[in-house]
Image (cartoon, coloured by chain):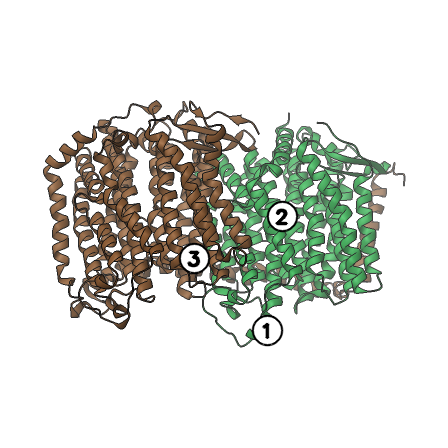
Chain colours: A brown, B green
């Protein structure tokens, strides 16, 4: 296999190449090993998983530090297989975007895996083997998705993530709800993946390559080709499925059937971000046809508000967080859409930066919140209904305080991480409004989402931790051990300070590191100095508007300090609250009929047609022939001799016929 | 690389396999029969592996290991054998499936001597089909495939075996008579006085067939092959045959017998009548699209797991029809790849369905539910094979599917949006079946003795594991297989282009 040179990139070689391979290979090898020996020798495989993910941080940091020092992007690729004029390659693209995200992912995978070792300790080894093997394979999938240099390999790792998500949602597969949720997750994301695959195929046939950089530098990579407009939208379709955006958002709340540590890693911190990453990675393609950014922004803004409203009335601690995840992912797409418009109009990459900053911040605070909820659920002896909690603050102080940091971060309170990114997201949306009016509306929706976010998060915190214990589970709740609270504390530190990178001169500030265009050869990245940006944020009136909105949301949640008001204690079935609680009845009104009526209906109809019409005709012909020709009946008796005799006679006749036809025959 | 002559290798290997089958049939005990069959299947497995490897490292565009013996000189009938990038993998698949199937059926107790003897006869005949380079020889092997398959269904089959075996023989036997007519027409029409396939196909595009003659004869040949594939609406013999056949029969039927249909199209019908085939392009695309979608929806409605897998074959073989309609490298390499991918994965799936029957006493999804807790290994293997079949990246089905869909975009543009949805339906029926049969809470049915459910036995497990590993191997390293297929598509498409 010949080494090919990625366009205009410094080649990865030697130790660097080994390090890059290690990042993907460590969890893969761990997964295989755990699969083979996890049941007995490795006692579930938790220790191996922690070791492998911990070790993977080292090569990730190796690249991360070099990136902070201003190192240039590197790449490496080899031929994988060839079909006709198409050559497919395997390779790495290590630019700022992928190095930064790889580091983030390895750290999160490590912390969450470490946390798992206690959270899952009641599970038998043979099940743990399944858990850790899938989790490690998932890590391989996520890291591969981020690091690969072309669409096909990205897609393969992307699908491996989907497989692991399916396996881990269905971890307790003997539960009907888990089995259904796993299937729903796979099928819904698969719908998006089909669109993504078509998008990739369009790129492949147009450019005869799927390497990101070869596509961007291809002479035919211009707005003149209408297929590229559709390719961008189809690729976005894949992102909508993976990141559970409207209207493919239905699977993520159900995915909470998996262990909470799975929800934290896959359905909050990493996999669902892959859609955001995909759009970020494909940004040049969207830039070609800026109208595509409208679609991205609108879907993101709508999802943000639509799903935040569902969290307002949720009664299950994990559901609150799941809806919140959807909503925050919506923010990221809003930022990418608005950021794209702003970039095209004003060559300003801040929206892209805001989306990525929010991706990172959300990864920290949502992993923290999910792990916190896992700690609560374990302390509550596996009860996760907020109505059964109350007063946990005193029983689980570490969990409480760390989760409070996460809550302040997601609510967007200065100086916690979420403030910086959310503020930039909204600022970008507002700015985009001057180029495309719809973004002004989306900006208002974003503000409204911020209000709701602060409200439902504090409602959740108050219901769980404040007031009096409402059940004996809450009375007897206990704090989790250090192996669980340790990762919580680390994540809390990140959730508190990560956003400050935007206004800190570390490596010139976050915008200098992560911006669009993400490599010099696509144009000149423009960015502001961190300190100037800080001044700008603090002197901007709209900053205080979004802060005020967040504070208002917190104030509105005050009534939950003493528990749920009596009229909210039952699961709402009707009225506006019922509408929200049942997720606007979309599943029941749209998806179930689509599956059960259209899907199963077509299946039943096909089956009937096949048996009655097609096979009926076949049997009809057979019956007539049978009845007409009595000799066939003897043939039917199934004895060896009859059949062989028929064949021999047939062949003899054939030879005879040919002898007659061709006079020159010599046997 | 040019053609490699190695007279006798293929025919003598076939003869050895046939003799082993005969010895197994006449063996004094069941134990002797299965041992003879297993050992007797190894030479063919070894030789085809060798051929597969050789074609892989050198050019698969030319025939290798060629035998070219005159048989009936006056008629131009020869004992010609050889393999290239299209057939080496299929012959190899047949020859390695056979020992695995023998292993899987190790405990067969009903007339075991005849059973293993017939499996070896089937092995011989199918390898013969994939290696014969003479139309007449091809036809003889093609017909001989029917005999062991017929008896496997008729003697070891389920309760409705007589109907199913007759339907199989009459339907596909009838179609092969039509195919024979096509052979005769091509033979006399070409007027070269030879049945030699390479000779005929080499000049196929230059023979200047009269347009109507070409259209008719291609249609006749294609009909013969499409019934075997099987294409909608000539597919209803397949689910009946599968449901009634013993596991070993189903495995061979889905694994390699269906590929005789696609192989015939690729080896004979298209190269012989390229212009006529081109004229049928849209017809074939529609035919394939209907099969892909209709077959997938049929799967959703099935209760018997075997019948579900049978209809999934209809759907997947529809992909091959679509792929051939594209007339481009991606599509034809994808079709050749799909042949092997479907062969490996569906063979494994039928083993899984058979094991489910052995483990629980039923294959009806409605009588199962939550058995995965009792049969974790079988559940995992079934899931792995189903995921492979639905085109999960990392397994070989995906490579075939991706190439074919890319080919469809190249040839038909936005029409891709029709067949592509089968991907979703396919995922739907597999995952839904898994969920209802294996996952969820225990749903005890009165017909199923829950306490006697056991997990898969080692001799059944090993062949399934082999199928999964092969599917992953070729999914991760597709070049192992695609290299030779590329050489072949390059050669055949150039031939068909007439230059």
Say whether marks 1 and 2 touch (CB < 8 Å).
Answer: no
Residue A246 left/right relative to A207:
left
User: Are labels 1 and 2 assigned to the same chain?
Assistant: yes
Say whether marks 1 and 3 touch (CB < 8 Å).
Answer: no
- What is the secondary structure assignment of the residue under circle 3? helix
Nearest to the observer: residue B165 or residue A407: A407
Name the disc covering residue A183, or none: 3
- What is the secondary structure assignment of the residue under circle 2? helix
Q: Residue at x 80, y 44 (%)?
A: B13
- What is the secondary structure assignment of the residue under circle 1? helix
Residue behind mark 1: B452
User: Are labels 1 and 3 assigned to the same chain?
Assistant: no
- Is B374 drawn above or below residue A500 in the view shown? below
Q: CA distance from mark 3 to mark 2?
A: 34 Å
Residue A95 left/right relative to B494:
left
Q: Is residue A130 visible?
A: yes
The image position of residue B195, as x and y in percent, is 77, 37
Residue behind mark 2: B226
Q: CA distance from mark 1 to mark 3?
A: 29 Å
Say whether marks 3 and 2 touch (CB < 8 Å).
Answer: no
């Amino acid at each position: 296999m010949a080494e090919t040179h990625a366009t205009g990139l410094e080649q990865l070689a030697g130790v660097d190449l080994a390090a890059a391979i290690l990042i993907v290979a460590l969890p893969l090898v761990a997964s295989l090993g755990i699969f083979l020996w996890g049941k007995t020798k490795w006692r579930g495989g938790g220790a191996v998983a922690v070791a492998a993910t911990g070790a993977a941080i080292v090569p990730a940091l190796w690249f991360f530090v070099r990136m902070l020092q201003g190192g240039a992007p590197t790449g490496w690729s080899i031929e994988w297989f060839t079909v006709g004029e198409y050559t497919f390659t395997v390779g790495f693209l290590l630019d700022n975007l992928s190095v930064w995200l790889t580091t983030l992912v390895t750290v999160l995978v490590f912390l969450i895996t470490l946390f798992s070792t206690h959270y899952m300790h009641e599970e038998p080894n043979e099940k743990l083997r399944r858990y850790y093997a899938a989790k490690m394979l998932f890590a391989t999938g996520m890291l591969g998705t981020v690091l690969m240099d072309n669409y096909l390999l990205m897609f393969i790792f992307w699908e491996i993530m989907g497989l692991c998500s399916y396996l881990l949602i269905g971890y307790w597969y003997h539960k009907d709800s888990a089995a259904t949720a796993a299937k729903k997750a796979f099928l819904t994301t698969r719908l998006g993946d089909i669109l993504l695959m078509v998008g990739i195929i369009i790129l492949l046939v147009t450019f005869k390559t799927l390497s990101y950089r070869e596509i961007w530098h291809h002479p035919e990579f211009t707005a003149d080709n209408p297929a590229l407009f559709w390719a961008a939208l189809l690729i976005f379709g894949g992102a909508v499925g993976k990141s559970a955006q409207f209207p493919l958002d239905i699977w993520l709340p159900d995915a909470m059937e998996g262990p909470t540590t799975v929800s934290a890693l896959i359905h909050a911190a990493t996999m669902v971000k892959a859609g955001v990453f995909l759009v970020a990675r494909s940004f040049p393609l969207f830039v070609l046809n800026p109208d595509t950014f409208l679609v991205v922004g609108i879907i993101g803004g709508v999802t943000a508000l639509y799903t935040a409203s569902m969290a307002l009335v949720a009664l299950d601690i994990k559901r609150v967080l799941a809806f919140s995840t959807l909503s925050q992912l919506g923010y990221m797409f809003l930022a990418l859409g608005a950021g794209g418009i702003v970039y095209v109009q004003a060559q300003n990459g801040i929206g892209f930066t805001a989306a990525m900053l929010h991706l990172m911040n959300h990864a920290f605070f949502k992993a923290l919140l999910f792990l916190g909820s896992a700690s609560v659920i374990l302390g509550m002896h596996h009860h996760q209904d907020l109505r059964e909690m109350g007063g946990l603050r005193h029983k689980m102080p570490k969990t409480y305080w760390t989760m409070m940091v996460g809550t302040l971060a997601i609510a967007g309170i200065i100086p916690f991480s979420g403030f910086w990114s959310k503020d930039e997201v909204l600022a970008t949306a507002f700015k985009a409004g001057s180029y495309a009016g719809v973004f002004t509306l989306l900006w208002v929706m974003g503000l409204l989402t911020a209000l709701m976010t602060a409200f439902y998060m504090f409602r959740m915190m108050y219901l769980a931790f404040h007031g009096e214990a409402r059940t004996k589970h809450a009375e007897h709740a206990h704090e989790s051990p250090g192996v669980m609270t340790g990762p919580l504390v680390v994540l809390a530190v990140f959730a508190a300070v990560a956003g400050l990178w935007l206004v800190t001169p570390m490596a010139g500030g976050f915008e200098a590191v992560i911006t669009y265009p993400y490599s010099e050869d696509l144009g000149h990245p423009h960015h502001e100095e961190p300190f100037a940006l800080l001044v700008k944020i603090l002197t901007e009136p709209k900053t205080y508007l979004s802060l005020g909105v967040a504070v208002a949301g917190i104030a509105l949640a005050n009534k939950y300090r003493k528990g749920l008001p009596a009229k909210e204690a039952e699961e709402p079935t009707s009225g506006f609250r019922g509408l929200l609680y049942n997720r606007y009845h979309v599943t029941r009104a749209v998806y179930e009929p689509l599956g059960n009526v259209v899907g199963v209906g077509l299946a039943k109809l096909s089956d009937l047609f096949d048996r009655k019409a097609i096979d009926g005709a076949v049997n009809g012909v057979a019956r007539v022939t049978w009845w007409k020709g009595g000799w066939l009946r003897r043939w039917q008796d199934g004895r060896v001799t009859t059949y062989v005799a028929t064949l021999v006679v047939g062949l003899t006749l054939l030879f005879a016929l040919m002898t007659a036809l061709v006079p020159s025959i010599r046997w | 690389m040019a053609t490699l002559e190695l007279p006798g290798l293929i025919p003598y290997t076939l003869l050895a396999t046939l003799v082993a089958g005969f010895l197994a049939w006449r063996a004094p005990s069941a134990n002797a029969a299965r041992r003879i069959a297993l050992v007797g299947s190894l030479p063919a497995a070894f030789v085809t592996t060798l051929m597969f490897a050789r074609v892989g490292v050198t050019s698969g565009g030319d025939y290798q290991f060629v035998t070219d013996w005159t048989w009936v000189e006056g008629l131009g009938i020869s004992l010609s054998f050889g393999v290239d990038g299209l057939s080496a993998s299929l012959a190899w698949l047949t020859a390695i499936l056979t020992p695995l199937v023998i292993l899987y059926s190790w405990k067969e107790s009903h007339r075991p001597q005849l059973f293993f003897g017939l499996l070896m006869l089937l092995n011989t005949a199918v390898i013969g089909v994939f290696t014969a380079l003479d139309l007449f020889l091809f036809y003889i092997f093609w017909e001989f495939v029917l005999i062991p398959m017929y008896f496997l269904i008729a003697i070891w089959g389920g309760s409705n075996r007589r109907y199913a075996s007759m339907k199989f023989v009459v339907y596909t036997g009838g179609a092969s008579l039509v195919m024979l007519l096509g052979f005769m027409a091509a033979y006399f029409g070409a007027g070269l006085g030879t049945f030699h396939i390479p000779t005929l196909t080499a000049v196929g595009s230059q023979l200047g067939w009269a347009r109507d003659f070409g259209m008719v004869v291609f249609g006749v040949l294609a009909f013969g092959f499409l019934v075997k594939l099987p294409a909608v609406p000539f597919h209803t013999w397949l689910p009946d045959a599968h449901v009634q056949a013993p596991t070993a029969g189903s495995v061979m039927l889905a694994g390699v017998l269906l590929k005789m249909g696609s192989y015939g199209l690729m080896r004979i019908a298209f190269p012989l009548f390229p212009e006529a085939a081109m004229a049928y392009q849209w017809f074939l695309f529609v035919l394939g699209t209907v099969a892909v979608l209709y077959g997938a929806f049929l799967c959703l409605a099935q209760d018997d797991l075997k019948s579900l897998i049978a209809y999934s074959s209809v759907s997947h073989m529809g992909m091959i029809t679509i792929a051939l309609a594209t007339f481009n490298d991606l599509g034809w390499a994808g079709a050749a790849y799909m042949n092997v991918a479907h062969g490996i994965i569906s063979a494994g799936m039928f083993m899984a369905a058979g094991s489910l029957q052995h483990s629980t006493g039923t294959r009806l999804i409605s009588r199962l539910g939550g058995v995965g807790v009792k049969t974790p290994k079988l559940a995992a293997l079934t899931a792995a094979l189903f995921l492979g079949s639905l085109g999960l990246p990392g397994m070989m089905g995906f490579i075939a599917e991706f190439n074919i869909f890319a080919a469809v975009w190249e040839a038909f543009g936005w029409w891709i949006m029709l067949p592509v949805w089968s991907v979703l339906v396919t995922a739907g029926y597999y995952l839904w079946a898994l969920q209802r049969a294996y996952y969820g809470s225990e749903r005890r049915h009165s017909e199923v003795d829950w306490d006697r459910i056991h997990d898969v036995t080692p001799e059944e497990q090993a062949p399934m594991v082999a199928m999964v590993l092969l599917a992953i191997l070729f999914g991760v390293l597709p070049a192992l297989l695609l290299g030779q297929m590329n050489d072949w598509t390059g050669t055949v498409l150039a031939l068909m282009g007439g230059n």
